[in-house]
Image: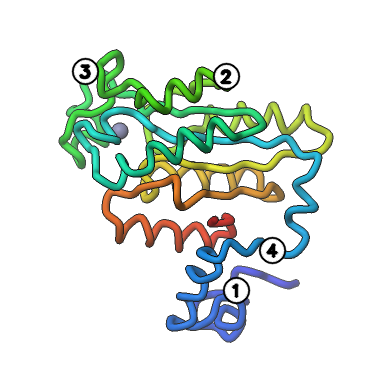
Amino acid sequence: MFCAGERHKAGSPGFRRVFGVAGERQGVGLRRRKGVWRKGQEERVKGMEKILVVVDMQNDFVDGALGTKEAVEVVDRVAAKIEGFEGRIFATLDTHEQNYLDTAEGRRLPVPHCIRGQKGWELNGKVLSALEKKGYTAVEKGTFGSVKLAGLIGEIAEAEAGGICVELVGLCTDICVVSNALLLKAYFPETDIAVDSMCCAGVTPKTHEAALETMGMCQIDVR
Ligand SMILES: [Zn+2]
């Protein structure tokens, strides 16, 4: 019986044929920058229910406790993306309680952030007003990936005969965007899942790029 896992293990001829050797791997980035979609993909998404997931565009990740200049730079693009989007929109909210420092995440990242009810927990103002204009569903999550989000998207997938396609934007590329993209890929392996690299920012530019490459390898369409 054909076993994809064995045939494509790292270093095997099959793996090299599909993904290229180290030097060629940069081609993944080149394809992304040119914005080339797989053949037939645009045809296929016609008639599908489009879903946009806006990940953790909260003050603490933009210009608060864990903010970065790259995150500030994507705010306008994310707001424009939301305003131009035709489909269902979910916005995730990283949500911690007062005991954050006593949690597993807090022990490894001892920077209190997104404490429920505080300013840092709230969505960035520009993003929020775009979301309010279009209508959205907020999904609070206590850790990186949201199983609840997958459940809500699953309900839409069941109801939509034409299928669904999902696009993710937001913060941080290398933690919560990648976690949710791969979680959704696990729940919906036959669904087109994309990430808009221009509407994401990572903890550092380097880890942002690394996460995009990881997602590309896991068949997330990196645009
Ligand atoms: Zn957190």
Asked whether the residues under the numbered discs 2 and 4 touch, taking CB atoms below 8 Å apart as contact, a structural biologist would say: no
Whole-number angstrom distance, CA of label 2 to CA of label 4: 31 Å
Q: Earlier in the sequence, mark 2 or mark 4?
A: 4
Whole-number angstrom distance, CA of label 3 to CA of label 4: 46 Å
Within-10-Å neighbours for mark 2: few <14, some 14–19, many 20+: some
Which residue is depicted at the point 76% across and 39% down?
48
Residue at the limit of the structure toward the top, as seen here:
117
Quadrant of residue 7 in the image? Answer: bottom right
Q: In the rendered structure, which amino acid carries the disc numbered 4?
A: Arg
Residue labelled with disc 1: 6
Q: Nearer the viewer, residue 51 or 83?
A: 83
Q: In the rendered structure, which amino acid carries the disc numbered 3?
A: Gln
Residue labelled with disc 2: 135
Which residue is depicted at the point 24% across and 34% down?
63
Whole-number angstrom distance, CA of label 2 to CA of label 3: 30 Å
Q: Dividing the image into four equal quarters, which quarter contains ligand 1?
A: top left
Disc 1 is placed on an element classified as helix
